[in-house]
Amino acid sequence: YKPQARRSSAGSQRVSPPQISPLRSPHSGTMASQADNRHTIILVQPTANKQSRTFLDYEKVSNAMDGVCQMFEKRLKEIYPHLRDITYDISDLYNYIDALADLSALVYSPEVNAYLPYNKEWVKKRAFAHLKRQAGQK
């Protein structure tokens, strides 16, 4: 999302407000911990069939990234039911995300009292950062 000028039917020009990043609050200066506590909705359409659309609801961004990874792991178990332990690397997760017909995230921003939309690339970056943090904790 980028701010852009729009014309109303009356011909006057309105400019949409700039996007406020959920990574940094303009008032507090804190980073990921505050941004992580934002309600997140994952919108997913696994196939080209529009009836495959669904949403997943999470209290935090990190929980949503767990949910995306769990969707991928569930798919791996469907493909390889005979394997007990399945390992994958980040490129496998990225390929899965890219293969989805559609995936986006809506993250609540209290600064604008609205949900801000994010695309597959944002989800991939956040999932990678989330997995990296998890790996560092083990």
Image: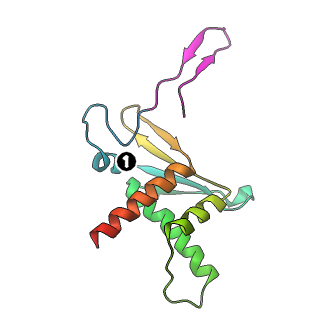
Which secondary structure is most common in the magenta stretch?
Answer: loop
Between 42 and 95, the residue placed more toward the observer is 95
Q: Quadrant of the N terminus?
A: top right
Image quadrant of residue 2?
top right
Residue at 44% x, 50% y: name it.
40
What scheme was used to colour the molecule? rainbow
Residue 41, x across and y down, in percent: 49, 51
Q: Quadrant of the C terminus?
A: bottom left
Residue at 37% x, 54% y: name it.
60
Residue 30, x across and y down, in percent: 26, 41
* Above or below, comparing residue 5 to residue 128 in the picture: above
Q: Which residue is mark 1?
A: 38
Q: Tag 1, which secondary structure? A: loop
Residue 51, x across and y down, in percent: 71, 58
Residue at 51% x, 56% y: name it.
124
Q: Which residues are magenta?
A: 1-19
Image quadrant of residue 80?
bottom right
Assess whether residue 87 is covered by the magenta stretch. Answer: no
